[in-house]
Image (spheres, rainbow, N blue to C red):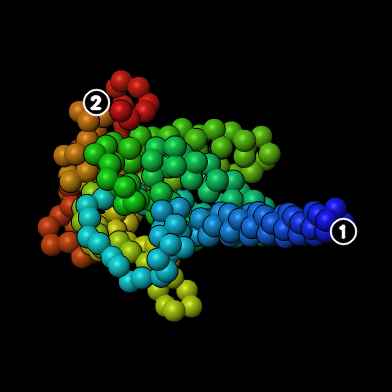
Amino acid sequence: MAWAAVVALLAALGVHAWRTRRTVGALERRLATARRELEALQQAFERFAPAEVVEHVIAEGVSARSEKKEITVLFADLQGFTELGEGLAPADLVTILNGYFERMSRAIVEHRGYVSKFLGDGILALFGALDANPWQTNDAIHAALAMRRTLADYNETLAAAGRPALAMGVGVHRGPVVAGLIGSEGLMEYDVIGRTVNVASRVERLTRTHGVDILVTEATRAALDGRFRLRPMPPVAVKGIADALPTFAVEGFDGGATAP
């Protein structure tokens, strides 16, 4: 009887252990599936907001927390693209524009910038907005120069396909902004607001006036490495700014293509 009881007890323990392992295994599989789904969701959200912002929202929920900081804003726009697009089939127009955005975004990200948004055929990029970056202004101009080189390569690709070349203008300004999650309850995005963004946009438009592709403001020039080659442009009156705005055309960089 004693042996029978022992055998029965061992059998019961074995069944319990097997059920426990099966339960643990099922829980582990469910956790692994949930982890993969969370990672996929986070990666999807990171297409619309910076990774740091997404991680903060996952950890703490959506908040109205904002902060004031000094950053460098790069605004790029295609010149004459609206008229050019009127002569293209919709599919060709989208293909060309997506190819441009992909290449320009890569040049920006490779120089520690963040593409905030696409505005029609324009790009708003931020440097120093997410993390403190003492080289943010140098990074922005290195990115602009990389965009210039990348566009030249892309135009060769377009020409080989029998498609028209693109022309780009870039304006860069450094100054204070308010950064945070901005929007409605149903739709929010990480954004920056303030005069600095408006000035960068105005400077980009001046590239047409001066016949150059990259223009920077005095505030930008003051923060730049002296090895950048700049050419002063005549001051021009622009909307929203009391005095005529002096700008500088960026011709190149003497000493390599990357920031320290």
Name the secondary structure under disc 1.
loop
Residue 48 got which mark?
none
The quarter holding residue 55 reads bottom left
Type of the residue with mark 2: Arg
Q: Are marks 2 and 1 in contact (CB under 8 Å)?
A: no
Which residue does the image show at 36% across and 62% down from the upper left? 191
State which quadrant residue 9 falls in: bottom right
Residue shown at the point (24%, 33%) measured from the top left: 230
Q: Rounded to the nearest whole Å, what is the CA distance between mark 2 and mark 1?
A: 94 Å
Quadrant occupied by the N terminus: bottom right
For disc 2, the marked residue is 227
Crowding near the residue tagged with mark 2, few <14, some 14–19, many ≥20 C-alpha atoms within 10 Å = few
Residue depicted at 76% across the width and 56% down the height: 13
In percent of width and height, residue 182 lies at: 37, 70
Residue ranking furthest to the front = 1
Residue under pointer 1: 1
Q: Is residue 162 left or right of residue 49?
A: right
